[in-house]
Image (cartoon, rainbow, N blue to C red):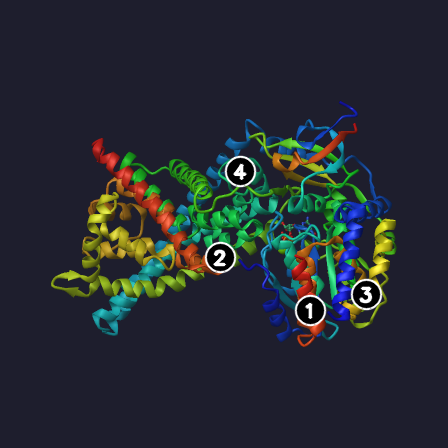
Amino acid sequence: MDSLEVGLNQILSKAQKVRWQVGSVREVIVKSIYEQAQEITEKVVTTKEAEEDLDRKIDNIVTSKILGYPLMIALLGLVFWLTISGANLPSQILADLLFGFQHRLTTFFHWISAPEWLHGVLVLGLYRCLAWVVSVMLPPMAIFFPLFTFLEDLGYLPRVAFNLDKLFKRAGAHGKQILTMCMGFGCNAAGVIACRIIESPRERLIAILTNNFVPCNGRFPTLIAMAAVFLGILVSKESNLLASALVAGVVVLGVFITLLVSWILSKTVLKGVPSTFTLELPPYRWPKIGTLLIRSVLDRTLFVLMRAVIVAAPAGVVIWTLANIEVANLSIIGYLAGWLQGFGRLIGLDGYIILAFILGLPANEIVIPILIMSYLSQGTMLELDSIEALRQLLIANGWTWLTALNMILFSLLHFPCATTLLTIRRETQSIRWTWLAALIPTTVAVVVCFLLAQTARVLGLV
Amino acid sequence: MQVTGLQEFLERIEENKGDAVIALAGNPNTGKSTVFNSLTGLNQHTGNWPGKTVVFAKGSYRYKKKNITLVDLPGAYSLLANSADEQVARDFICFGKPDATVVVVDATCLERNLNLALQVMEITPQTILCVNLIDEAKRKKMAIDFSKLADLLGVPVIPTVARDKVGLLDLKESIHRVVFEKQLLQPRRIVYNKVIESAIEKIQEEVEVLVHGSLNSRWVALRLLDGDPTIIREIFNHLQRMDPGDQQSKRALKVVEDCG
Amino acid sequence: MLDQVFALTYLPIGRKAQVIKVGTEGLIRNRLLDLGFVPSAIVEAIRKSPAGDPIAYRIRGAVIALRSEESRQIQVRVVD
Ligand SMILES: Nc1nc2c(ncn2[C@@H]2O[C@H](COP(=O)(O)OP(=O)(O)OP(=O)(O)O)[C@@H](O)[C@H]2O)c(=O)[nH]1
Ligand SMILES: [Mg+2]
C-alpha cells in the first residue's frame, strides 16, 4: 500500500464518520442550498399581486374529474376533424395538378419516342408514386403538425400524462410513457428516442416496445384514406365528422392496446414494480403563432415529407418493375401476392395488402402507393386521383368493409418501419429487443385481424 | 443502455471547437433550447414540457471575431442526482470543462432554479446566469432586481426573453467578457453547517493532492462526504482520462470500486 | 389535526403544510430532495388527477405531480 492509497482510505473513512454524525449528508447539503436560494430570491423578487390563477382555472377544467377525459378525447377528435376536413380541398388540388402534369409527361415521352418501359418506370412508377405521396401526405401533415405543436407549446401534454398516469401505473409502466407516445404521433423513431426521459430501464423498454401502437404521421394518411373508404362502403356517403371520429377511435384503441401490452410485458419478460414518478406541470405559455407555423411546416412537415419522398421514388421504380415483368402471364407481384393470399384471407386482408405492408417496411408512407400500383397493374383502371376512384378500385379488387377495417387495424398495430427498428436497435443496444419490438406488434395485429375476420364471417356479416 | 455517450461527444466537440466551448445548463423547460436556437440559428426542437431535449446538441456562433461553440444540455433539477438525463448535464459541466457555463433560469420560479445555479457555481466560477422568460414574470406582475441578484451571486446576470430574441446580445457580450477578457468572477459560496464545513476543511488538502488542480477540491470533498458512489466513480474516471498514465488515480479508482 | 404529523398523501387539496421528514432511501429520496422536498419547505396540495392519483403539489414555485407511493414517504404538518 502506498501513501496515496492510505490517503484515500483515510479520506473515505473520515467521510464515513461525518455521515454517521450528521445522519444524511445529502439532506443537509440540499437543504442548505435550497435555503440559500430561497434567501436570495426573497431579496430580489417582489410580487405585486397574488400569483396568477388563470393556470389554475384552466387546469381545473382540463384535469377535472368529469370533464378531464372527455375533453382529451374531444380534443383528439377536433384535431383530426380539422386535419381531415382541412386537407380535403388542398389534397384534391394537389392531385389535380400533379396527375395533370403526369399527362404532360406522358405526352413528352411519346413525343421524344422514348421506349415504353422507360415511360413505365419513370412516369407510371416513380412519378406516380411520388405524386400520390405528396398529394395525400402534405396537406394533412401541414395541418396536423402546427395543431399538435400548438398543444405542445401551450403545455397541454404534461396534463395528458397527469390524467392518464394511473392507468399506466396499473399497467406497470411509467407515466412519462404518455409523453413519449405523444412524440410518436410525429414519428415513432422520435418517440423511441424520447423514451430517454424515463429513468428506469425496465419502464423505458416497455415504452420503447409499445411506442409503435401510436400511429405516426406516415400512417395517418393511410388511416384517413381507409376510414373514408370504409365509411364509403358501409354508409355510402362521405362524412368528415364520422371519419375523424373513426380515426380518433383508432388512436384510443392504440392507447388501450399499449396499456394491455405494457401490462403483459410487466407481468412477464419485464417483471417489476413501477419506479419513481415525478412530473412537473409547467405553466401554460401562449405560443408564438408565426414562429410556430414556420417551424412546424419547415422543420417537421417538410422534413418528414422529404424522407417519404426519398423512399417513395425508388420504391415506385421497384414496384412498377415487379408489377410489369411478367412470367407466364403473371407479374412477379402477382406471384408474390399469390403466395400470401391464403394467409391474407385468413386475417381478413389479401395477398396484395400483406405484400404492400412487407414492401412498405422502409416507410409506412409507401404502403398505399404500393397497393394501388399492384392493383393497377391488373389493368382494371388507369387513373387514380380521388378517394372515390380509390374506393372503386378497391371494391373492384374484392374489398369489403371488413377489408378496409382490418387494413386500418393492421396499419395501426403492425411492425414498426425500418427507421424505427434501427433506432430501437441503437437505443437498446440489443438485437433481441429489436426483434421483439417487431414481433410483438405483428402478433397483436395478426391476432386482432384474425379474430375480427373470423367473427364477421361466422356471424355472416360479410 | 448507454445514454450519456459523454466520451464520444467530448471527442466530437474537440474536433471543431472554435475559440471557446459554452455549456447551456438549467432546470427542465426554462428555454435552454430556445436560447440555443436564437444564438446559433439552428432548430433544436423545443416544447413546453420538461424533458424535451434528451441528447446533446452542438452549434456555433460568431461574436467579436471569435467562434463560440454552444452545447445545449438536457434539463436537470440538480447536479447531485443519478438519473440518466441529469447525469448527462452533470458530466458535461463537471468533466467536459466548458470555458463557461450559462445557467438558463426561469424568472417566474427563481428559487427552484437558483438551486441548480448555485450547484453549478460550486463546480466552476465561470458561470453566467441567464434569467429567461422575463415576459412571463412581467405578466405575473413580478419585479426582479437583477443588479442586486448579480451582487448576491457574484456572477453576471442577464435578463432575456429568448423567444423574442431580447437580451441575447447582452448575453453574447457577457460570455465574451468572461471568456476572453478574463472578467474576474467571485461566485457566492454556499456555506454548510459546522459539522460539514469542518469536515471539508479536514479532507480538502488531501483531496487537493488527489485531483491536483483538474477539479475543484472543495466540490470533490463534498462529494466524498456525501458518499454517492456513482459520482465518486465518475470523478476518478475523469482523473484517469485526464492523465491515462497516472498510477495514482488508477489505484484510487480501484479503492473506490472496492468500497462500492 | 393541526400539530399532527402525517403523510403528504393525506394533505387535503388546497391546504399548505411544512415538510418534516423525507423517509425512504436511495434514489427516490434523492429525487424528492432535489425537487425541493426538504425539511421545513412549504408544500401545497393543488389538485388530484381525475383518477385520484397522482396528486399535484406546489413546491418552491413549481407544480410537481407525485404518485401516492412517493407522497406517502414525505411527512408533513399542516401550517395554514
Ligand atoms: N414566453 C416565453 N416563452 C419562452 C421563452 N423562451 C422559451 N419559451 C418557451 O418555453 C418552452 C420551453 O422551451 P425549451 O427551449 O424547449 O426549453 P428547454 O430548457 O430546452 O427544455 P428541456 O429541453 O425540456 O430541458 C417552449 O415552449 C418555448 O417556446 C421566453 O423567453 N418567453
Ligand atoms: Mg431543450
Q: Amino acid at mark 4?
A: Lys
Q: Amino acid at mark 1?
A: Arg
Q: Is residue C43 above or below residue B202?
A: above
Q: Amino acid at mark 3?
A: Glu
The chain containing the residue under callout 2 comes to A
Q: Which residue is mark 1?
A: B251
Q: Tell me where residue C58 appears, x and y as whole percent.
A: 71, 37
Q: Residues under labels 2 and 1: Cα distance?
A: 32 Å
Dot 1 and dot 3 residues touching (CB under 8 Å)? no
Disc on res. B206: 3
The chain containing the residue under callout 3 comes to B
Q: Find residue A345 and report its image quarter.
A: top left
On whether disc 4 and disc 2 are found on a single subunit, the reply is: yes
| Foreground tag (2 vs 1) | 1
At mark 3, the secondary structure is helix
Disc on res. A428: 2
Q: Residues under labels 4 and 2: Cα distance?
A: 22 Å
As drawn, the residue found furthest toward the left would be A328
A169 displayed left or right of C60: left
A385 displayed left or right of A250: left
| Foreground tag (2 vs 3) | 3
Q: Is residue A268 above or below residue A415?
A: above
The chain containing the residue under callout 4 comes to A
Dot 2 and dot 3 residues touching (CB under 8 Å)? no
As drawn, the residue found furthest toward the bottom would be B245
Q: Tell me where residue A363 appears, x and y as whole percent.
A: 38, 57
At mark 2, the secondary structure is helix
Q: Residue at x 66, y 31 (%)?
A: C9
Question: In the image shown, does A28 or B23 lie closer to the viewer?
Answer: A28
